Each structure stands twice: as structure tokens, then as C-alpha cells.
Amino acid sequence: MNVIHENTSIPFCEENMKTVEFEKEEGESPSNIKRLSAFLRKFGAFLVISAAIAFLSIETSGWGQLERYYLFLGATLLFSLLGVFCVVRWREDKSARTFLALATAFVPVNFAQLGAFLLATTQGHVSQFSKYYSYLVFKPISLSLLAITAILASIVLSFVSYTGFSALAREKGKLLAVAYMLVNVTLLVPFRDAVFGSFLGLGLAIGMVYLYRKRISNDAALKSADGVIVRSLLGAPIALLVVRN
């Protein structure tokens, strides 16, 4: 399924079932748009690699764990904005879906880091790798700073989820974005227990399967590769929850 059709529009921000028409500006040839979109995809790959290097070299960079989190949150938002830009400016399908799906896939990672901050603040240092990589230890931060970070992250990640699922699922985008955010919130639970995590993950998986079968499975737009991506995205936070615990 193509998110953007030649003579139609895509409703990234639904309001009273209205859509916004995007028109190509004069003077922009298809070849130039393709070259620019290819550049953006390469730039996105560069950002992913750079973020990984920054994360691994954080011990010597002089940055703290909170700065590292804001860097990752900013990269997530940037991918989403690049996807929206490809739609609004160029109506370029492939690049838009790539950026938006990638940004949406980063949402559980952001929530998992917030959960680690919350656990560290309430129970002390948290890391499964502290013996080998001391800079991966999550240390306590003030509750006020944690609250501000969580509120800011919630706003950003809600936008990312909504734009991502609106591009992939169109009419079902709002429903899927809400369900996705609710599942990701469980990653904030401030304790770790294998049994609890397994039962919680099982319950969430059953709920997602029920939601998908009752409300989404009959949607023709999701009987394509986009449907596979949507199902993978919905399962990602559940898998992360189980593995983490």
C-alpha cells in the first residue's frame, strides 16, 4: 500500500475527518526529488550509526546519562520530522514511510530508558552491565527533573507514534497510536521480576491480538507489507518488556 497517492492526500493530523492537500511546487523535477530523498535516507542511516557511536563512547565524551537520553529522544523526533517533511514537501512515499516507521520503532527504547531512570531514582543504580561498562549504569536523578523529562518525552513520543501509525495505517492510525503508547507505558514499571514480566507481557500480547482481530484485521490497507510493519511495531514493546525482566 502506498501511503501517498498521486492525486490524493494523507491525513497526518486528522481533524473531523478532513485531509490536507499537498501540492508539488513548480521547478522541482522528479529526478531532483528522488536524489534528495535518497540523500535523506543515507543521512538517516548516518544518524543511526552516529547515535550508536555516541552511546558507546559516552564514557569519554564528558556527557551524562541524561544528556545521552535527550540525544536519543532528539534523534527519534528528527526521524519523524524528516518523514513528515518528505510528505509535505515532496510527497515522496518511500522515504516518508522509512523515516516514520524507524522513528516509531524507537519509541519503546525511549520508554525503556525512562523506566530505567525511574527504577534508579526509586531503588538506586540500575544496570545489568555495570561490571563491564560502568557508563551504562543508570543513576538516580531528582524527581522534579525526572518528571519534566517524562512529560517532555510523552509529548514527543505521542507525536512520533501518531505520525508513524497514520502513515502506515491511515484511518486506524489514531487507535493504533493510543494502543501503542499505552503498551509502552508499562515499560515505566519501577521494578524487575521475571514472573511478573512474563505474565504482564502475556496479558498485553493477548490484548493486542484481540484488538487487532476485532478492530484492525479487516482493514484492507493493512493486508500488505505495511500490516506486517504495524504488527511488528505493536509487538516490539511487549518483547522488550519480557526480555528486560
Image (cartoon, rainbow, N blue to C red):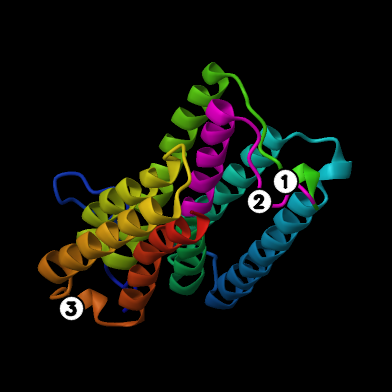
Left or right: 2 as drawn, with respect to 98: left
Observer-side mark, 3 or 2, equals: 2
Residue 220: mark in rendering: 3
Q: Nearer the viewer, residue 198 or 28?
A: 198
Residue 25: tell me if it is visible. Answer: no
Q: Residue at x 56, y 40 (%)?
A: 116
Residue 128: mark in rendering: 2
Q: Is residue 1 magenta?
A: no
Decide: few, some or many residues near mark 2? Use Cα within 10 Å; few <14, some 14-19, many ≥20: few
- Residue 222, by quadrant, is bottom left
Which residue does the numbered mark 1 point to in the structure image? Answer: 136
Pointers 1 and 2 in contact (C-beta within 8 Å)? no
Magenta stretch: dominant secondary structure: helix
Q: Nearer the viewer, residue 86 or 216?
A: 216
Q: Residue at x 85, y 35 (%)?
A: 62
Left or right: 155 as drawn, with respect to 224: right
Residue 187 x, y percent position in the rendering: 43, 46
Figure check: 57 above or below 43 = above
Q: Amino acid at mark 1?
A: Leu
Q: Amino acid at mark 3?
A: Ala
Helix, strand or loop for disc 2 = loop
